[in-house]
Image (cartoon, grey):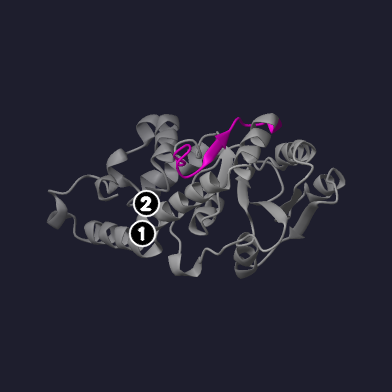
Amino acid sequence: RKDWVLSSIAHRLSDHTVYLTEAYRRTVQNAAGNFHHSEKTSVIPNGLKIEFYKPTHRRQSEEIVIGMQGRMDDGKDFKTLLKAFSQLSDILSDHQLVLELIGDGPDRAELEQQSPANVRFTGFLSHSELIEHMKRWDFAVLSTDGETLSMAVLEAWALAVPLIASDVPGIEDLIVYEKDGLLFDAKSPSSLCSMLRRLVENESAARVIGGAGRARVEKEFDRKRIWQLYQQLIRRLLHPAAHLSEPANLDSLH
């Protein structure tokens, strides 16, 4: 409740509020009620420096590498991923499956204790190191309790890594199911295992999903385009009279 009150006060005192997604703006609006002024809000997503992300042919050995990045604490559901990976390893025992977990946090020690030998923990990596590791992934997973606009999703897309994510708020309205990613039932290892097996056994379908993710980033999340949206917003805030005929927010520019 304290956070909602502080957010409402900040919104009232600011000239403009930018949300990363329409879903998050609706959430805040519903919680804040009359304290929320939609006419002084816009939706502008995060952006990536597209040229920094160069997709590669990842299969460099017989290993099939499944990866997830994120802070190891409340909010990210690594335990479901570990259980799903264990199930997948039993089903596909003739495959050399590896799970790579990138990140650190208070839950790391417990997760390591629960993990077999074919689970790798890298700890915290610099951004350039992170990208180099992700280039070697065959599949990316985001097992989470909820997101605003996940950079992990955008980076997997940018590298054309086939993505599987939890069907939760912030993800369900971002990923176009079976086009640029697959969704599994949150907290369900069997659902995630089924999705992973589906992609492992259908490499051509996985490549199509990865390519669609890359195309999505190029179209919607290029940092240059995002900066143009901020420039337009800034100009309108500086010279409101010159933009009276424009929409009250930037949604139509998306």
In the image, the segment drawn in magenta is: 174-189
Report the predominant secondary structure element of the magenta stretch. Answer: loop
Q: Is residue 49 shown to the viewer in this render?
A: no
- In the shown orientation, is residue 242 left or right of residue 43? left
Q: Quadrant of the N terminus?
A: top right
Asked whether 74 or 101 is in front, the reply is: 101
The answer to whether the residues at label 1 and label 2 have Cβ atoms under 8 Å apart is yes
**Label 1: how many residues lie within 10 Å, few (<14), some (14-19) or many (20+)?**
some
Say which residue appears at 38% left-offset and 50% top-offset: 18
Q: Position of residue 48 (x, y in %)?
A: 45, 61
- In the shown orientation, is residue 235 left or right of residue 26? left
Q: Position of residue 88 (x, y in %)?
A: 73, 38
Q: Position of residue 54 (x, y in %)?
A: 51, 67
Asked whether 93 or 88 is in front, the reply is: 93
Tag shown at residue 44: 2
Say which residue appears at 46% left-offset and 51% top-offset: 213
Q: Is residue 173 shown to the viewer in this render?
A: yes
Asked whether 118 or 104 is in front, the reply is: 118
Sequence-wise, the earlier of marks 1 and 2 is: 2
Location of residue 231 (image quadrant): bottom left
Which residue bears the numbered disc 1? 226
Q: Position of residue 128 (x, y in %)?
A: 60, 69
157 part of magenta stretch: no
183 part of magenta stretch: yes
Which kind of residue does numbered mark 1 sit on? Ile
Determine whether 136 is above or below 79 in the image. below
Location of residue 161 (image quadrant): bottom right
Which kind of residue does numbered mark 2 sit on? Ile
